[in-house]
Image: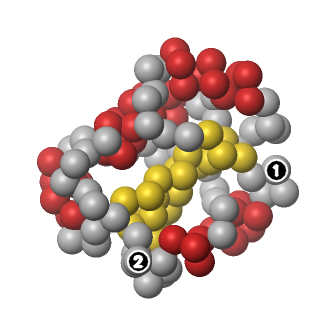
Amino acid sequence: INLNNYRKKLVILNFWATWCAPCKREMPSLDNLYQNNKFKNLQIFAVNMEKKNMVKSKNFFNDLNIKKLKIFFDPKLNFVKEFKLKGMPTTILINKKGEQFAQIIGEVDFEDEKFIKWLLKYD
């Protein structure tokens, strides 16, 4: 992923792992956010922080009935270094200028009405 290719989009980077219980709880709401028709310029990257294992990751998504999100990996941990990640799940929000404007450590309800209303300001 080269984030420079996604300028003029609201970008959400969500870092997760299959063993992470809060990741499992929040992933369906993240998928639903990605399907929310109110957003016109939203790009979400769900980045698995484990050693690359597509079968295990696909099973995780299938078990949660994830429909739109795609699985990404960061095998060289470039994002960990760039964003100084401290735990999982972590969500990074990047505005249309390519600037990080928020970092959320921990579980998020991406379907929360207040969260959506706030996020739409950046779409």
**Of helix, strand and loop, which one carries label 2?**
loop
Image quarter of residue 19: top right
Nearest the viewer among 15 and 98 is 98
In the image, what residue type sits under mark 2? Lys
Q: Residue at x 40, y 70 (%)?
A: 9
Where residue 97 appears, x then y in whole percent?
A: 44, 84
Q: Few, some or many C-alpha atoms within 10 Å of disc 2 (few <14, some 14-19, many ≥20)?
A: some
Left or right relative to 18: residue 63: left
What colour scheme does the image use?
secondary structure
Vertical position of residue 58 compared to residue 39: above or below: above
Determine which residue is flagged by label 1: 75
The residue mark sitting in front, 1 or 2, is 2
Where residue 53 appears, x then y in whole percent?
A: 78, 30
Image quarter of residue 121: bottom left
Vertical position of residue 67 compared to residue 107: above or below: above
Nearest the viewer among 8 and 122 is 8
Q: Quadrant of the N terminus?
A: bottom right
Q: Quadrant of the C terminus?
A: bottom left
Is residue 90 visible from the viewing direction of this image? no
Q: Few, some or many C-alpha atoms within 10 Å of disc 1 (few <14, some 14-19, many ≥20)?
A: few
Give the Cα separation between the discs numbered 1 and 2: 27 Å
Left or right relative to 55: residue 30: left
Where residue 112 appears, x then y in whole percent?
A: 21, 44
Determine which residue is flagged by label 2: 8
Q: Residue at x 53, y 19 (%)?
A: 62
Where residue 68 appears, x then y in whole percent?
A: 44, 37
Q: Residue at x 39, y 67 (%)?
A: 10
In the image, what residue type sits under mark 1? Pro
